[in-house]
């Protein structure tokens, strides 16, 4: 109904077609920014058109509604985001989503989006916010009615804007706060610990760079979230994981 047959392209949708489609399925306000994010993800050829195949591959993202309840878990490298999020998933029946895991899984699937992500990562470039949010939104649809805990995302104000545009405003942000010296000690300790706990970037030089990047983007991210009236709850994570988890469970 909404596709147009174009010479050399077959059945496909342009910007206007997608706007009409969304209005046709009941989306009252279709903003240009949201439309552009859809094309950032689905238009893998970058020709301003979404083919029928591309539409089918991304239909859950294009047509899906916003998840009802999102909780953010943010903090510096070594703050314990991943470990605490996994424990919350087990003990509080929330759905834990890790941005890194989602990227690796999508590449393994061999989808059109996964191939695009693989090429970006192979070039050493950052995967766009729109693609990250698309992957998260797709996974969220597998868990209707559940609270979704996003581990380590958003990492920048751009991430945060894309998240709100495509998925709606989060319920709250759990902000893990800790001195840099403690974070460095944890990262170096993890690199010297059990092999299953190690990461390739758990070394002093890389840890310093990760902290620099974190401090460059994190304040603006929190400021933007507060401007959107997302409650940001500061939690001292310098103590034991059990003590921090107890505070998070109370919230």
Image (tube, rainbow, N blue to C red):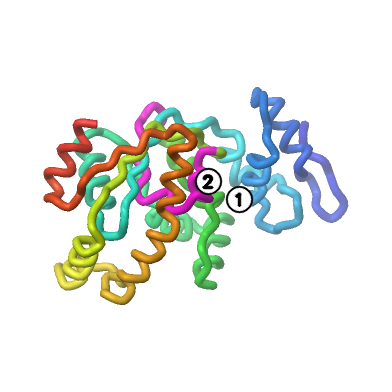
The residue at 67%/24% (across/down) is 28
Q: Where is residue 50 in the image (x, y as percent from the top left)?
A: 71, 47
Mark 1 closeness class: few <14, some 14–19, many ≥20 residues within 10 Å: many
Q: Where is residue 12 in the image (x, y as percent from the top left)?
A: 76, 45
The residue at 54%/45% (across/down) is 162
| Residue at the spot of label 1 | 41
Q: Where is residue 173 in the image (x, y as percent from the top left)?
A: 35, 39
| Residue at the spot of label 2 | 134
Task: Evaluate whether residue 102 shows in this view.
Answer: no
The residue at 82%/41% (across/down) is 4
Q: Report whether 97 appears left or right of 112.
A: left
Return the disc, 2 or 1, that comes first in the chain's sequence. Answer: 1
Quadrant the C terminus occupies: top left
Mark 2: which secondary structure?
helix
The residue at 27%/48% (across/down) is 176
Quadrant the N terminus occupies: top right
Taking the magenta stretch, the answer to whether it contains residue 163 is yes
Task: From the viewer's side, name the closer residue of 18 and 174.
Answer: 174
Residue 226 in the image: above or below residue 51: above
The circle drawn on residue 25 is none
Residue 184 in the image: above or below residue 36: below
Look at the image and give the residue range highlighted in magenta: 143-164
- The picture quadrant where one finds residue 208 is bottom left
Q: Position of residue 129 (x, y in %)?
A: 53, 52
Taking the magenta stretch, the answer to whether it contains residue 179 is no
Q: How far apart are marks 2 and 1 (CA)?
A: 7 Å
Task: Evaluate whether residue 250 shows in this view.
Answer: yes
- The picture quadrant where one finds residue 149 is top left
The answer to whether the residues at label 2 and label 1 have Cβ atoms under 8 Å apart is yes
* Outermost residue to the bottom: 205
């Amino acid at each position: 109904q909404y596709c147009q047959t174009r010479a050399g392209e077959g059945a496909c949708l342009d910007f206007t077609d997608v706007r009409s489609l969304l209005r046709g399925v009941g989306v009252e306000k279709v903003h240009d920014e949201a439309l552009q994010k859809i094309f950032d993800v689905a238009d893998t050829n970058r020709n301003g058109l979404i083919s029928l195949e591309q539409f089918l591959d991304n239909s859950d993202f294009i047509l899906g509604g916003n998840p009802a309840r999102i909780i953010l878990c943010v903090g510096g490298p070594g703050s314990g985001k991943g470990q605490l999020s996994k424990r919350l998933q087990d003990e509080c029946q929330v759905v834990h989503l890790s941005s890194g895991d989602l990227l690796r899984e999508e590449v393994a699937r061999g989808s059109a989006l996964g191939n695009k992500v693989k090429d970006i990562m192979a070039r050493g470039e950052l995967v766009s916010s729109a693609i990250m949010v698309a992957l998260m939104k797709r996974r969220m649809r597998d868990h209707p009615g559940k609270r979704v805990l996003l581990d380590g995302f958003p990492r920048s104000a751009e991430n945060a804007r894309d998240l709100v545009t495509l998925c709606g405003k989060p319920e709250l942000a759990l902000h893990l706060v800790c001195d840099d010296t403690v974070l460095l000690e944890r990262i170096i300790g993890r690199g010297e610990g059990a092999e299953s706990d190690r990461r390739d970037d758990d070394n002093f030089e890389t840890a310093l760079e990760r902290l620099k990047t974190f401090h460059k983007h994190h304040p603006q991210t929190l400021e933007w979230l507060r401007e959107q009236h997302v409650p940001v709850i500061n939690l001292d994570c310098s103590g034991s994981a059990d003590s921090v988890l107890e505070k998070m469970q109370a919230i």
